[in-house]
Amino acid sequence: MTRRFLIPYLALFCVIAGCGGQSAIQPTVVRDAEGYTNEGMQAFNSAQWLRAQWLFNRALSLYEGIDDQQGVVTSHINLAEVALSVRDHETTRKHLDRAAEISRDPSLRHFQSRIKLIYALNALQQNQIEQAESFLQPLLPAFDGIATTTTPDAVQLAAIANRTRIAFIQEQDQETWTQRYQKAIKRSTIENPDYEARLLRFQSALLLQQGNYEKTESHLLLALSGYKANLSRSGIGATLSELGQLYMVQGRWQDAKEAFNRSIAVYRYLGDLTKVIQVTENMIVVEKELGNLENSRALSQWVVENSKDHADHPEFR
């Protein structure tokens, strides 16, 4: 899942556990566990974090009660994704550590790539760039120049996207990694509007560096449409924020204000206080440029009050 590079994040990595054993009792338990998991996925997709957490914990308890290790590791991965969505880094790591331990079993090793990806996302959220890159490196496919030598799967696509994100953070090889991501999407057999939308955002960042504001805006608007088609809230919020930043560069202050207000509304729905604060900091500048000094001061005060220790108290919606 995680919508959030949520690309920001992929769909929840939910695998239905197999049945066996006591024919009169275990099938009912398994059906209940599957039901909690499916309801948890629905809650996750609606950003109902507390409900998703409760449902996945119920599934985990049932799977543990019948010693279904595949169900147990899946539940820990799902709970890690929920914690990641609210930036609860300690809880994310706790569930990943447990999932990693269980997945050492030869029959469960196929979970390891997904677990490493979430470790990388957790590190990225904390700006631990080198650590994130170390988790991503073994997940990346081989490249022949900018083209992958094999057809990438979903985890590899996410790994390439996040490695491209790191390239922009480090301001190194941005174009190369953007081209690699583009080639990987074309070679992949997975259809998801989020992949193309994220590519458009990477391309828009390159265009902005070149001063091509018209194409930058066009790419961002196309990305926004793609995220909306897939109801990818974190992508919508990020793209609106990037549109606002573009309008700031152009001095289009009223357009920037509208874009930032829309981005803040999305991030408030997601309960992502970190992103709300980041976008609000841009809004402070916009309000000053528009001559709304009282609004700017009020927003500054709000940021100061809400920045205190908020990272240690993740907000569930």
Image (cartoon, rainbow, N blue to C red):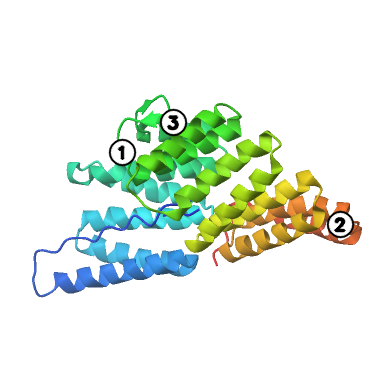
Task: Give the distance between the C-alpha atoms of the residues marked 1 and 2, in whole angstroms.
Answer: 52 Å
Distance from disc 2 to disc 3, alpha carbons, whole Å, reads 42 Å
Q: In x, y percent, where is residue 145?
A: 41, 24
Instruction: Please give the label number shown on residue 151.
Output: 1
Q: Nearer the viewer, mark 1 or mark 2?
A: 1
Disc 3 crowd rating (10 Å Cα; few below 14, some 14-19, many 20+) is few
Lower sequence index among marks 1 and 2 = 1
Q: Quadrant of residue 114?
A: top left
Position in image of residue 292 (x %, y %):
89, 59
Q: Which numbered tag is attached to residue 134?
A: 3
Secondary element under disc 2, as helix, strand or loop, is helix
Q: Nearer the viewer, residue 89 or 291?
A: 291
Question: Amino acid type of disc 3?
Answer: Ser
Q: Is residue 298 left or right of residue 57?
A: right
Q: Residues within 10 Å of mark 2 (few under 14, many from 20)?
A: some
Lateral position of residue 50 relative to residue 215, left or right: left
- Rendering coords of residue 1 (x, y %): 41, 55
Question: What residue is shown with label 2?
Answer: 297
* Residue type at numbered disc 2: Arg
Q: Nearer the viewer, mark 3 or mark 1?
A: 1
Secondary structure beneath dot 3 equals: helix
Depth check, front residue: 189 or 308: 189
Query: Which numbered disc flags the more N-terminal residue, 3 or 1?
Result: 3
Disc 1 to disc 2: CB gap under 8 Å: no
- Is any part of residue 5 visible from this angle? no
Q: Is residue 219 above or below residue 12?
A: above
User: Which label was assigned to residue 276?
Assistant: none
